[in-house]
Amino acid sequence: MNNSQLIDKAQAICGCLSYDDSTPNGSPKSVIAELCHRLGERTVRIKKELGGYTMTTLYGRQRALTWKEEVMWRLFGWPPRGFEVLGEVAE
């Protein structure tokens, strides 16, 4: 199971929970929602475009890879530090 599938399942579970349950460490719904957000921001797709490579998170935020990140991705297939690649879109 990859991060995208895990996020989808966790969000479905989160939708079934209510905020009425109060525990000392926070409600389970808010913890699951935060987990989904953090995983979704760190899981990316890398796509080659006309001006270089673009990195897009699971939530749709995107940015161009820096020159150093682009060289490391092209030569070694290493994603930027702190990110996990869901897949490269080949064109």
Image (cartoon, helix red, strand yellow):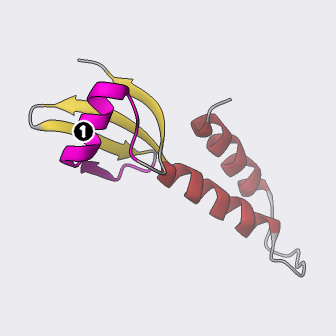
Above or below: residue 67 compared with residue 49 = below
Left or right, 41 with reference to 47: right
Extreme residue toward the top, this view: 91
Q: Is residue 70 magenta?
A: yes
**Residue 75, image x, y percentages:** 29, 26
Q: Quadrant of residue 33?
A: bottom right
Left or right, 29 with reference to 87: right
Report the residue at 71% width, 48% height from top.
10
Front residue of 48/12: it is 48
Q: Quadrant of residue 56?
A: top left
Mark 1 closeness class: few <14, some 14–19, many ≥20 residues within 10 Å: some
Point out the image quarter for the N terminus: top right
Secondary structure under tag 1 reads helix
**Residue 61, image x, y percentages:** 34, 53
Report the residue at 15% width, 36% height from top.
52
**Residue 64, image x, y percentages:** 22, 47
Point out the image quarter for the C terminus: top left
Extreme residue toward the left, this view: 51
**Residue 53, image x, y percentages:** 22, 36
Total marks in image: 1
Q: Is residue 91 magenta?
A: no
Front residue of 74/36: it is 74
Q: Which residues are magenta?
A: 59-80
Front residue of 72/58: it is 72
Left or right, 20 with reference to 40: right
Q: Amino acid at mark 1?
A: Glu
Q: Which residue is mark 1?
A: 70
Report the residue at 62% width, 32% height from top.
2
Q: Quadrant of residue 89?
A: top left
Report the residue at 72% width, 59% height from top.
32
